[in-house]
Structures are given as structure tokens and as C-alpha cells.
Amino acid sequence: MPRPADPARRRFVLSTYGLGTAAITTGLAACAGETSSDRGLRFATLAAAEEELTRLAAAKELVSAAAWNWPQTLVHCAQSIEYSMTGFPSPRSELFQETIGSLAFGAFAWRGRMTHDLAEPIPGAPALERPGDAAQSVERLRASMRAFGGWSKPMRAHFAYGRLTHEQYELAHAMHLANHLSSFRAKA
């Protein structure tokens, strides 16, 4: 004979379901969120990202609504690539990486586009200099991209996404660059 439903258990299950649904809905809304200054760039490879980097670096003047200036943004992107080879200074817990982080990367990869807070530094990374030197920052980013392209050792776990293959990391870096470079445009 079936047991009568426990009202407390039923409330718990329903509230957990509601929280999960709210978290997923909020996450999908954040993934879809784009600002008016976002050009919506999409790159699947670092080579594609480098083409846009070259175009923007050659501009006489850039316009952006980003919190970070051009050199700071480039150094931030270089840090991310460098840390994928050397290790991130302050990773999230393995539990976070294997659950929320892995799901976030999967959602970005599925969409082919990453969206995140463009003023959030990599946890534990050195502060970004202001104003910074544009030419040096471009060269640092290019050097990190070249080093990544020739990297044959195991990749280090991403601070949020956890373990990624070289191919997954290339996609992550390309999407990261697309997200940041989307906030810059050459002044007409």
C-alpha cells in the first residue's frame, strides 16, 4: 500500500525544483544578454581572433564603453591564455569546476559565444595597469597566442571550467577574446 505523501518533503522537492529552474533561467538570460556596445563577435579559433586584433590594433583611435581600456583588456586576455599553460593563481573548488563551471563552458560552447562581466579580473591575477602601453599589450597577447599554439604539455585546469583539452581551451580563449574585442570599435 502506498505511503501518503509527506507535505514537508513535497514542499522541499518543489522548492528545490523552483530554485533549479530559476538558476537555469537566470543563467540562460545572462548568456543571451548583450549590450548596445557589444558587436557580437564570434571566433572559434585564435587565428580568427588574431585577425580582429590586427584590425583593431591598426586603428588610429578606438571607441569603447568597456570598463578597462585597450591595453588592460589585452593584458587580461593574455593572462588567461598564459594561465591555461602555467596554472591559474586562485582556482575555484574542484566541485565548482566539475559542476557549475563545466556546465557554463558547455553552454558557451553550444552557443558559440561567451558572455561574462568584462570588468572582472582573473581571481588572483596581478592588477591591470592603467593606462598601459598599447603596443606592448598587443605584443604580449600575440606572444601568449603563439606560445599556446605551440604548447604540447598538458593544459592546466581553468579556474572555473576545470580540465579542458587543448582544443577546448582554444575555443574558450577564442570566445573570451570575441567577448572582450566586441566592446571595441575603430572610430570612423
Image (cartoon, helix red, strand yellow):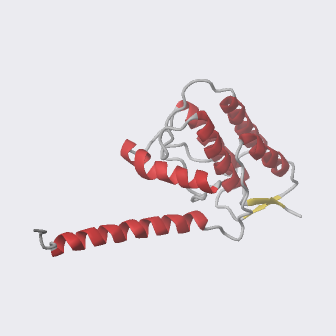
Q: Quadrant of residue 141?
A: top right
| Residue drawn at x 88%, y 54% as measured from the top left | 60
Q: Quadrant of residue 98?
A: top left
Quadrant of the rendering where the C terminus is positioned: bottom right
Q: State left or right for residue 3 relative to residue 169.
A: left
Front residue of this view, candidates 186 and 160: 160
| Residue drawn at x 65%, y 54% as measured from the top left | 112
Note whether 3 is above or below 94 in the view shown: below
Percent position (x, y) of residue 97?
Answer: 43, 45
| Residue drawn at x 50%, y 64% as measured from the top left | 27
- Outermost residue on the front side: it is 1
Q: State left or right for residue 129 relative to residue 3.
A: right
Percent position (x, y) of residue 26?
Answer: 48, 68
Percent position (x, y) of residue 118?
Answer: 61, 58
Front residue of this view, candidates 2 and 184: 2
Note whether 166 is above or below 122 in the view shown: above
Front residue of this view, candidates 35 and 7: 7
Q: Quadrant of residue 155?
A: top right
